[in-house]
Image (tube, rainbow, N blue to C red):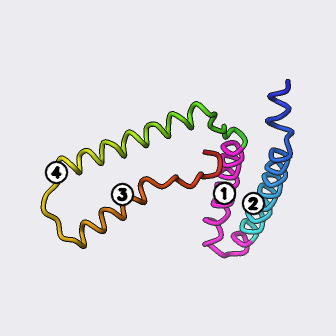
């Protein structure tokens, strides 16, 4: 019960529920308005009358995805860090194996890219 409670009744989840309700109400009102305009003779409004329910469905899908987003645990974060470090090492080794005469500008640019690749990555929300 605690998992369900924390999943559906946390402050973040309640905010998502409220946002979904507002989104669905807005889409329903816009669709109703477009149906009225289409009945009055605006033929383009028939397309919009179909489009707003599609937006409502996309809102439900987004709500579901955000509600079921799982945060990565420490083991997954560590595995990703090790994978990234292994890829950097393989790239360094491949670069050393293929070392050819480069222009100084190209060498400086490649060194700059390598330094960017070794910097810690900015954490994205939820990852």
Mark linked to residue 114 = 3
**Separation of residues labelled 3 and 4 (CA atoms):** 15 Å
**Separation of residues labelled 2 and 3 (CA atoms):** 48 Å
Q: Which residue is mark 4?
A: 98
Q: Which residue is mark 1?
A: 55
Residue 94 % position (x, y): 23, 46
Residue drawn at x 60%, y 52% as measured from the top left:
124
Residue 64 % position (x, y): 70, 42
Q: Give 122 or 7, whichever is nearer the viewer.
A: 122
Q: Give 72 or 2, whichever is nearer the viewer.
A: 72
- Give the mark nearer the N terminus: 2 vs 3: 2
Question: Which quarter of the figure has residue 48?
Answer: bottom right
CB contact under 8 Å: marks 3 and 1: no
Q: Give 42 or 63, whichever is nearer the viewer.
A: 63
Residue drawn at x 73%, y 65% as measured from the top left:
35
- Give the mark nearer the N terminus: 1 vs 2: 2
Find numbered disc 4 in the image and state the secondary structure of the residue it sits on.
loop
């Amino acid at each position: 019960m605690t998992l369900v409670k924390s999943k559906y009744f946390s402050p973040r989840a309640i905010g998502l529920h409220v946002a979904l309700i507002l989104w669905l109400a807005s889409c329903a009102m816009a669709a109703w308005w477009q149906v009225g305009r289409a009945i009055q003779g605006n033929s383009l409004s028939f397309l919009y009358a179909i489009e707003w329910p599609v937006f409502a469905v996309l809102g439900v899908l987004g709500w579901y995805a955000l509600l079921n987003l799982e945060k990565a645990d420490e083991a997954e974060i560590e595995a990703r860090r090790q994978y990234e470090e292994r890829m950097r090492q393989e790239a360094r080794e491949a670069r050393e194996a293929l070392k050819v005469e480069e222009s100084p500008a190209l060498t400086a640019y490649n060194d700059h890219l390598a330094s960017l690749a070794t910097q810690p990555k900015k954490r994205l929300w939820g990852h």
